[in-house]
Structure formats: C-alpha cells, structure tokens
Image: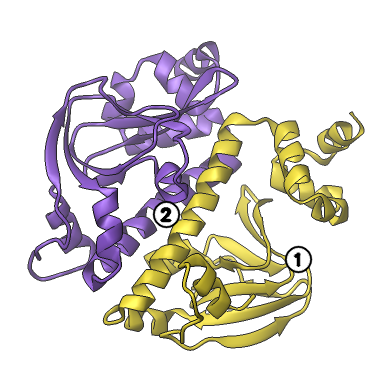
Chain colours: A yellow, B purple
C-alpha cells in the first residue's frame, strides 16, 4: 500500500486524492538504521513492505519498543515533536520498501492545507491508538500473556524472531522466554 | 487555563482565537464517573482544575492507567476513535472544573475547518507524546523507579494518594509499595 492508498482508506474517500506534500521512495535493506539514538529526526517513514523495529536503551540494555508492519507510519516522533535528540533507534528488521515524508515540508504544509491537517490528525490518531493498546498490555499482562498476544497477532513473525530479540520486546531474560515457549 | 488559552499556547499564537466548535463548562465533584466501563464515549474533556484518573479492568482487578492534571485533554479515545464500548473508566480523583467538547460536533467541524484540524492534530500529538513517555517507563523502569519518577514529577500529589490507589498505578501489591516507601 502507498501513502496515497492509506489516506484513501483511512479517510474513507471514494477516490484517491493528490497528497498535499511530496514523498520519496526508498529501498532499505535489512539492518539499515534509519534513525539512531541521539540523532535529530527529520522524516516520517511509511512502510510499504517489510518490518521495522524501534528500540530504546535503558541502563545500557536494549529494549524493543515495537515491531512495525506494512501500511503504518514510523518515526522518532518524540524527537520530531519536541525537536530533541532521539531516544529511540529505528531499524529495518527485514528488507523494507519505504515512502518518506520530509517533516519540515509537512510542517509548512500544515500552516495552510486542510487536507494535510486531516491526514496528519488521522495518522496521529492511529499511532496514538497503537501506543494505548501496547500500554494497556504492558500494564495488565505478564510476559507470557504478551507473548501469546503477539503470537496470536503475528504467528509468522514470531516464528522468525530469534529468542534474543523477542525477549528484548517482552522485557524478560532469554532463559525465561525459552521456558515460556516450552511450557 | 481554558481550551482557548491552551490552543493559543500550543499553537504559539500571538492572540487568542475563537474556537471553531462549542464547549460547555461543568463542575464535577470528587468521585464523579464521567465515562464508565462498557459505555460509549461521546465527549472530550479538558481539565481546567482538579485531577482525573483513567483506569481499566483486567481479570476483575483494577489498574490505574494514568493521573490527569490541569491543562490536559482526557477521554476514552479508543471508544471515540473506534466507536466501541469503553474499556477504561474516567473518574474525578479531586473536584474538577471541566470544559467539554461534544465529539459528534467536533467530527463535523473536522470536515471543513482548517483550524479545527490543526487543534485536533496538536492535541492528539500531545496525547501521543504522553502515552509514549508512559510506555517507555513501563518498559524500562521497575515499580520502585516508576514510583520515584512520579514522586519527582508530582511530589504533592503522591503525598495525597492512598497506598491502595498508588499501587494500582504502579501495578504492584500494596505491601510491595509500602516496602518501597520505607526503603
């Protein structure tokens, strides 16, 4: 899916419309770091195909914030919105076909374009919903339940993620995850 | 602060502007439930003064998602955005002076008003940032560190919250919190 198609679907339009900002396409192979820790973010990424991960460091230990799948926006939003260095890393977990929006251009479009603001609001609402869902999981489920939830949502992905990465996402030690998997 | 003043500040305007939607004021005493579990949300609340809490149930146990302070928007957004029954409860933790936006009216304003979309986008971005911050805390800090973080942000509040409520926020047993407090 392209951003244009995503907007058509998300805004329930009958026909695709011309976007009020430019986008550029990019192929980023597996393990490409698009935004690194302490870097100032300048773009918003849309995943056409592939998987990305966002991670953060805490006490020199890496934790995976989330896996990101096709047809979703990814970016170091805290860095964009607060103009501060990124506390997360955006990395391609698989080969990715991306569409990229320059944030400075987007901001300038926001000043006058109704459509740009409608798109920005809709995309932000979806991102907000996904964060709220993840937060509720973190608050109510233990690691085993979160593993089962991820397994249910993305069985194919879970099979391909090494125990080491998956345990960084669940916030537990690899040995504990191995026990859960066997259980 | 009023919504009008919040918009002026958030959008860095030189003068306050007329809002493109109507709002109504409401005083809600302590313990008022504004939105309950399984209810369809129809409003967005702005806290002028007071404190609200959002909570959710998991396996018949209540967990506090967050405390909400003056000059912020609160609502069961998952219910609003997905038109499904609310999985959270919005309750006044202290007496609250609120300003209320009717969501149906807001949605209709979104269709044509640049300003309404700019305000909606800005407010959603701020909500998103607060969720991301909380999520990062849940993912990287243990209960004691989250307690210290809350204490640092809102020392006065923490003094007034009973151990029972605070432990629902931290996701630990009241006895564990008592140990942390003494430690």
- Disc 2: which chain? B
Viewer-nearest residue: A128 or B85: B85
* Quadrant occupied by the N terminus of chain A: bottom right
The image shows residue B62 at horizontal and vertical percentages of 49, 21
Badge 1 sits on which subunit?
A
The residue at 78%/38% (across/down) is A173
Q: Which quarter of the rendering shows the C terminus of chain A?
A: top right
User: Mark 2 and mark 1, same subunit?
Assistant: no
- Secondary structure of residue under mark 1: loop
B173 on left or right of A25: left
Label 2 sits on residue: B129
- Residue at x 38%, y 77% (from the top left corner): A116
Q: Quadrant of residue A29?
A: bottom right
* Rendering coords of residue B54 (x, y %): 39, 32
Q: Would you say A151 lies left or right of A21 here?
A: right
Q: Is residue A111 above or below residue B53?
A: below
Q: CA distance from mark 2 to mark 1?
A: 24 Å
Mark 1 crowd level (few <14, some 14–19, many ≥20, 10 Å Cα): some
Compared to residue B181, the image places residue B45 above or below, namely below
Q: Which mark is residue A93?
A: 1
Which residue occupies 44% across, 35% down?
Answer: B86
Question: Secondary structure under badge 2?
Answer: helix
């Amino acid at each position: 899916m392209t951003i244009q198609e995503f907007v058509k679907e998300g805004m329930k339009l009958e026909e695709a419309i011309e976007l009020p900002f430019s986008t550029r396409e990019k192929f980023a192979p597996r393990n490409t770091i698009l935004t690194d820790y302490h870097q100032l973010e300048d773009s918003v990424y849309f995943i056409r195909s592939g998987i990305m991960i966002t991670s953060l460091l805490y006490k020199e230990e890496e934790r995976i914030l989330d896996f990101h799948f096709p047809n979703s926006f990814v970016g170091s939003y805290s860095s964009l919105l607060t103009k501060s260095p990124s506390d997360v890393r955006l990395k391609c977990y698989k080969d990715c076909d991306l569409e990229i929006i320059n944030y400075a251009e987007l901001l300038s479009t926001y000043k006058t374009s109704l459509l740009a603001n409608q798109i920005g609001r809709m995309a932000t609402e979806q991102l907000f919903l996904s964060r709220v869902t993840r937060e509720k999981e973190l608050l109510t489920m233990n690691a085993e339940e979160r593993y089962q939830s991820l397994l249910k949502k993305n069985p194919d992905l879970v099979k391909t993620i090494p125990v080491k990465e998956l345990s960084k996402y669940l916030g537990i030690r690899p040995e504990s995850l191995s026990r859960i998997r066997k259980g």
